[in-house]
Amino acid sequence: MSQDSKDPIAAHLALSFAALDRAVHDPQLRASAREIAATIIAALRSGNKLLIIGNGGSAADAQHIAAEIVGRYKQDRPANAAMALTTDTSALTAIANDYGFEQMFARQVAGLGQPGDVLLALSTSGRSLNVLAALRTARERGLITIGFTGKGEALAALCDHLLIAPSDDTAIIQQIHLTVAHGICDEIEQAMMGEVLRK
């Protein structure tokens, strides 16, 4: 029996640490994260909103990120406009029933998205059909598109900005996504707070 199988928690922590260390030392990932933060800040300053989508664990991350931006991350400040399209069970089930699972996010983007808004799509595989459909709709409607993935080929053509987590393990990709998202939330909050203080 291997040491890893005797202590799966320690093994997972070690894999997570190694992946986060790769992320810390990945200049492309850091540059992408800064560009993404700047893009969202510019949209919020212009009165636009951030829409966020994902499946499974990424759906939970979508609402987590939206809550940080609408509520607060670390500081009390005015609310910013963000919405997870993963939380309205009536809309999700009606759209999936009437139009098919692939359209569950695209239909919401069509109804809620406006030119200049930002769509942040979380997909560890980069192949989720409902995420790809939503990105296509966002492009058609003039939204700025951002993808967080672990394998970027399918998303790359549909995203203005793409962040690729340096791992092929779904759970670790999600951890990197949320860790980077928290850093982006911090940058957004500091920028928006700075604007409030200057007024």
Image (cartoon, grey):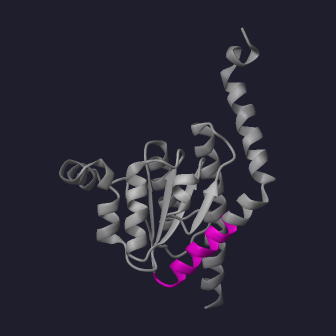
Q: Nearer the viewer, residue 15 or 161?
A: 161
Q: Nearer the viewer, residue 194 or 4?
A: 4
> In screen coordinates, is 176 left or right of 147?
right
> In screen coordinates, is 25 left or right of 39?
right
Q: Quadrant of the C terminus?
A: bottom right
The tally of labels here is: 0
Q: Nearer the viewer, residue 37 or 81?
A: 37
Quadrant of the rendered structure where residue 31 is? bottom right
In the image, residue 7 sits, relative to residue 138, either above or below, namely above
Which residue is situated farthest in the top direction here? 1
List x then y, in percent, for residue 22. 77, 47
In the image, residue 72 sits, relative to residue 104, either above or below, namely below
What residue is shown at x 57% (from left), y 70% (from top)?
A: 76
Which residue is situated farthest in the bottom direction here? 199
Dominant SS type (magenta): helix
> Which segment is the magenta one?
33-47
Q: Quadrant of the N terminus?
A: top right
Does the segment drawn in magenta span residue 42?
yes
Q: Nearer the viewer, residue 32 or 72?
A: 32
Quadrant of the rendered structure where residue 16 is? top right
List x then y, in percent, for residue 133. 38, 58
